[in-house]
Image (spheres, helix red, strand yellow):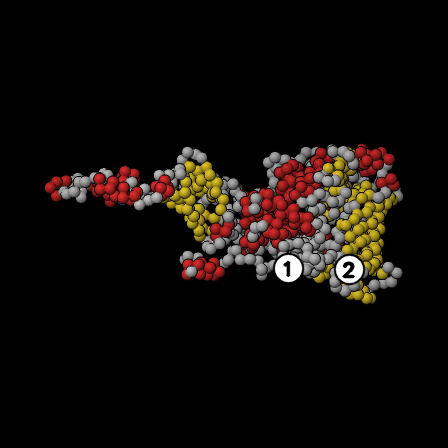
Amino acid sequence: MKVVFYAVLSCFLSVNLFGQVQEDKFKQLYDEFATPNVYRNAAGAPGPNYYQQKADYKIKLTLDDAKQTLSGEEIITYTNNSPDPLTYLWLQLDQNIMKQGSDAMLTSTSSIESMSSPYALTHAFNQAAFDGGFKLDWVQDAAGKAIPYTVVGTMMRIDLSQALVNGASYSFKIKWWYNINDRMKLGGRSGYEYFEEDDNYLYTIAQFFPRMCVYNDVEGWQNKQFLGAGEFTLPFGDYEVEITVPSDHVVASTGVLMNPTKVLTKVQQERFEKAKNADQPVLIITHEEAEAAEKNKASGTKTWVFEAENVRDFAFASSRKFMWDAQAVQLEKKKVMAMSYYPKEGNPLWDKYSTRLVAQTLRTYSKFTFDYPYPVAISVHANAIGMEYPMICFNGGRPEKDGTYSDRTKYGMHSVIIHEVGHNYFPMIINSDERQWTWMDEGLNTFLQYLTEQEWQRDYPSRRGPAHLIVDYMKGDKAFISPIMMNSESIQQFGNNSYGKPATALNILRETILGRELFDYAFKVYAQRWMFKHPTPEDFFRTMEDASGVDLDWFWRGWFYGTDHVDISLDNVKRFQLNSHNPEIEKAFLKDQFDNENKNISDLRNKESIKETVNERQPELNDQYNTTDIYQVTDADRELYEKFLSQLSTEDKELLNKGYEFYQLDFTNKGGLVSPIILQFTFADQSTEIVRIPAEIWRRDCLKVSKVFFFQKEVVSVTLDPFLETADCETFDNYFPRKMVLSRFDIFEQSLGY
């Protein structure tokens, strides 16, 4: 009883054998998690009273190619499915990030050093000169009466004359316009690129209309300011959008084209119909047609009409430079379309790869989540960008002007297309709050991007996913590393934190902690539970545990809430053998030990310096104690052995004769992040054995542990983390016996200036 009491007390206090008080790495996440309720249950699923709002849009747009402006009128119908009466509504005005004096501009830091390059100076001057942001003409109710509204940075509140109650809908209208930014000079997720050679523009347009904020059970109104890093969180709805553009422009858009007979030639319509059943890309608009449009600019305008159901956002691209190809993608239960739009500057990469990459992304992501539910997925070429919206994304990857390209350009283009198309799943369908939690879309998406890259090409040079690729970041200066569970605007090392580390964590969870079968099942449960809904981090964490049947709180705590890294040291390996008590064996063992043991320096030198000892000169001084061979087996030894055997059971006797070798391995957790211990034992006969120890081995002492292993053959070496699957940051202490780990260093020629 006393032993049990002390064991429990030790675990509760997290005190190790040396009296050191330690952090409890296996404490449940009760303090960090929100309390389960009727909206979100403890299993990570939507609760019985889960709700979400709906926002439907009817929008009419005009793109002015001469002035680079976009103007629009929209009717928003907002449905309140919450139990709360709403006396005001919040909208996002994301274009206001480009407005002079925006919070994003005022709170961005700079120094003289950061402004010292020509690019930085030019960018600063261009930004200061640009007249950005929404110009609101009016906000009216459905009857045309003005509605009071207040603009707060990148947000707008409209005040209702009476509360919008549960189940009721409210329609209102907004008229607006804004100057489109030159994306190549000012940056931004959308804008235009100007092609001086042929005097044409390529527009990639997003965040272009006042959009409803999310109202839910977690945040109420999610009305955080848009500062640039934290992206978007939006309610689902249906869209009817009319886009008026120059008559020779081609428009790619969220949704389904509703008037192809009015905007496409008869031949282009026939090609489009052919593409619907093609398993390879079919050109709908050819290089020759696009080049002719570039050179012979037409007058007048044309209106393209698109409709989209159950999407959280809307974006489009427009240019007379576009080629357009498409193919069908057969998924498990349905067929959808993959498409690409690109100017001649994108070839020869884009016509060869883009649509095929879109198709493969849909196949791989659907396999791990659910069949892609939308009718189309589109990749649009836009230089030096990667950005995603429902059914459409804008992707970089441009060859040199002579058509050549490097492997960096090729694989960069491949990866950005896979990544941005993959965002259709996270967060466009599994609709997490990007403004708050970047990792919930970027990290999960980067993980599936890695799986897609590997299915696309054997030994694809993936930059993120495998554990060893995150090591340099993980072992860096903790002053410049944020926990994954950090607000999007406060993250340090954005790419590593929100893309690389969570993707690596999920890969470790899949390969090492749960195994592929358990992980894939749980991940699919999460995806299908929360498709077309608004999950939180807790919903993901709880679902993965609930569906896998494995307590993972220690894993989430270490990888997502902390900044520790994995660094386990294999400190020592001690070899033992059972004492057989057989004098023939044991005395031979002792003699061998004596003959082969290292002699101390005095003994070695005395053999040389002492020519003759006293007893060597006077043999009469010797007796049985220094003349008898102590390693010789006597009858008395044999009698003792027989007596010993008589006291053993048959099972004990068999154990003594099996020749077991015992090895005690001592480990230190140097990095602080608890992790499974994976060991590879290599034996004298060159055979190997892998032993996988769960992370719970650290549950009573998270600093030092020991473990005894036994085999029927001799171990000659032990390797810790032999398959580089835990992100162990220092590998020199992963071997016993120690071996040199080869690395490289560069010699840099220093230039001295006076």
Q: Nearer the viewer, mark 2 or mark 1?
A: 1
Is 540 above or below relative to 469? below
Residue 646 shows up from this direction: yes
Give 348 or 643, whichever is nearer the viewer.
643
Mark closest to the chain's N terminus, 2 or 1: 1
Q: Which mark is residue 324?
A: none
Give 254 or 690, whichever is nearer the viewer.
690
The quadrant of the picture occupied by the N terminus is: bottom left
Is 327 above or below relative to 234? above
Residue 223 shows up from this direction: no
In the rendered image, residue 187, in percent from the top left (x then y), is placed at 71, 49
In the rendered image, residue 591, in percent from the top left (x then y), is placed at 27, 39
Q: Residue at x 56, y 52 (%)?
A: 552
In the rendered image, residue 232, in percent from the top left (x then y), is placed at 71, 53
Residue type beneath disc 1: Pro
Q: Which residue is mark 2?
A: 80
Answer left or right for 556 relative to 202: left
Q: Find numbered disc 2 in the image and state the secondary structure of the residue it sits on.
A: loop
Q: Residue at x 75, y 36 (%)?
A: 327
Q: Find numbered disc 1 in the image and state the secondary structure of the residue it sits on.
A: loop
Answer left or right for 588 relative to 426: left
How many numbered marks, from 0 up? 2
Q: Residue at x 46, y 59 (%)?
A: 8
Residue type beneath disc 2: Asn
Label 1: few (<14), some (14–19) or many (≥20) C-alpha neighbours in 10 Å: some
Q: Which residue is mark 1?
A: 36
Label 2: few (<14), some (14–19) or many (≥20) C-alpha neighbours in 10 Å: many
> Label 2 vs label 1: CA separation?
23 Å
Query: CB of mark 2 within 8 Å of CB of mark 1?
Result: no
- Quarter of the image where one finds residue 446: top right
Give 295 or 411, whichever is nearer the viewer.
411
Q: Residue at x 78, y 43 (%)?
A: 252
